[in-house]
Image (spheres, helix red, strand yellow):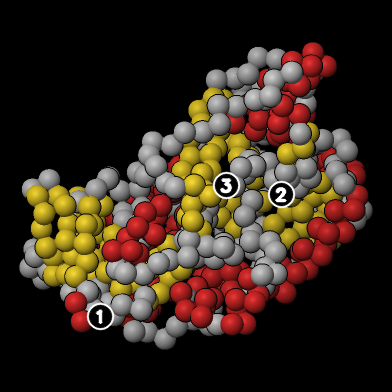
Amino acid sequence: MSPKTAEVVICGAGIAGIAAAYHLAVRRGVTGVVLVDERPPLSLTSDKSTECYRNWWPGPGDAMVLLMNRSIDLLEELARESGNVFRMNRRGYVFVTADPARASDFVRRAEEAARLGAGPVRIHASASSDYRPAAADGFEGAPTGADVLTDPALIRRHFGYLAEDTVAVLHARRCGWFSGQQLGMYLLERAREKGVRLVEGRLEGVDTAGGRVRAVTLATREGRTTLGTPRVVNAAGPFFKHVGRLLGVELPVFCERHAKVAFNDTLRAVPRAAPMLIWTDPVRLPWSPEERVEISASREHRRLLEEFPAGVHGRPEGAGESPAVLLIWTYDVEPVEPTFPLAFDPAYGEIALRGMSRMIPALSAYLPRLPRSVVDGGYYTKTRENRFLAGPLPVEGAYVLGGLSGYGLMASNGAADLLADHIAGRPLPPYAPAFGLERYEDPVYRRLLDTWGDGGQL
């Protein structure tokens, strides 16, 4: 290919675009791949992730579990070939409740996940049960499926740092986390070894004369340039909808702003070998009587006395003796237009810490004098039902890889693998239709959207 042509132009050098370049060039042997972004790779929202993965997904159907199992298979292959340069573990996701009614729901959810392909269910209702804790590092030989612990003594033995009124714990096992930056750079290096070009620039236009992709216009430091190409991939993250419009296609996605908070847990309230911990009950933030009086007198802050939704979660961060802890709470899901830099709720860090102290009481020691914390985050670009888009567009030669919501790092390899099959003309996996844009043309699917229920977002 000449400097003015490409076989495939990928718009966006976040984890989705980089994974697409890797799977096309390295695993499918496609030459002439160009990756375009006006920012450095992995620097917009991909580096704001909590870097976790899971095959624990609800229905309808088994498409998300199958796709995530494939994506995790690919992650494990990459970990093995790289010497686990991105430090993948399988500590699991641990869902926790103090509501006795939810204990039976945990069993039901685990049985449903097993039917969808997440792995077997193990119920631990006695203190003598053979529950196997997760290893802090690595993933080889770790169990799949889920363990449900309902015996109080067993819960205290293995999770003594949880609230004393905890009645059930669900440990989803094929889950964990890794370094997203290290993964992304490894994929990019491998892709560049196979000839992938990284161009610093902004996609400003796509020539689709005659109903097919013919060229793209890029704004670079040297000025505007035209790159002839028969294929374009929209992997533009928060700008996914905008790039879709350049192709004349209105994509059914919207953006939500999501944040996380990091602080140094000098008191070691969260054990360094802990899994991802998720509180599944609604929470009222803990305040002293004096604080309640003060807050109730403030119209601006009165919401802090209201019940917050379930789902506050967090995990240890960093290797070795790192004291860092990440906390996340998705309590604001209003759609927004993506703008940069992002602005977050000034009270987010305190809200997340107070909420997490309901599950891990030792964290309440920080409440009289809050620790220094850093809040950052990005946009979840998502579809109505929270399932991504990967495949062709109505314009010949145009493809999408986006709507990856808050699970881009964990799904990127499975999604890019699927996209690469589309582009390379290979046989598609059985779950492919669940992620195509054409699903919205199916009247049965459109009716299903009205009763969808849980989209799997934490």
In percent of the image, x 47 and y 79: which residue is there? Answer: 438
Q: Which residue position holds label 2?
A: 94
Is the Cβ of the residue at disc 1 closer than 8 Å to that at disc 2?
Answer: no
Is the residue under label 3 in contact with that under label 1 (CB below 8 Å)? Answer: no
SS under mark 3: loop
Q: Where is residue 5 in the image (x, y as percent from the top left)?
A: 12, 69
**Whole-Å distance between the Cαs marked 1 and 3?**
36 Å
Residue 71, percent from left and from top: 50, 65
Q: Which residue is drawn at 55% across and 31% down?
A: 345
Which marked residue is nearer to the observer: mark 3 or mark 2? 3
**Residue at point 44% right, 52% down?**
84
Amino acid at dot 2? Val
Q: Answer with mark 1 or mark 2, whichever residue precedes in sequence.
A: 2
**Is residue 282 depicted above or below 306 in this figure?**
below
Which comes sooner in the sequence, label 3 or label 2? 2
Label 3 and label 2: CA atoms lie apart by 27 Å
- Per the model, the C-alpha gap separating discs 1 and 2 is 49 Å
Above or below, 221 against 374 in this view is below
Disc 2, SS: strand
For the residue pair 158 and 281, the one nearer the viewer reads as 281
Judge depth for marks 1 and 2 and give the one in front.
1
Q: Name the residue under label 3.
A: 334
Amino acid on which the number 1 mark rests in the picture: Gly
Whole-percent x and y of residue 33? 22, 67
Give the residue number, with chain letter if any, for mark 1: 211
Answer yes or no: is residue 97 visible. yes
Q: Quadrant of the N terminus?
A: bottom left
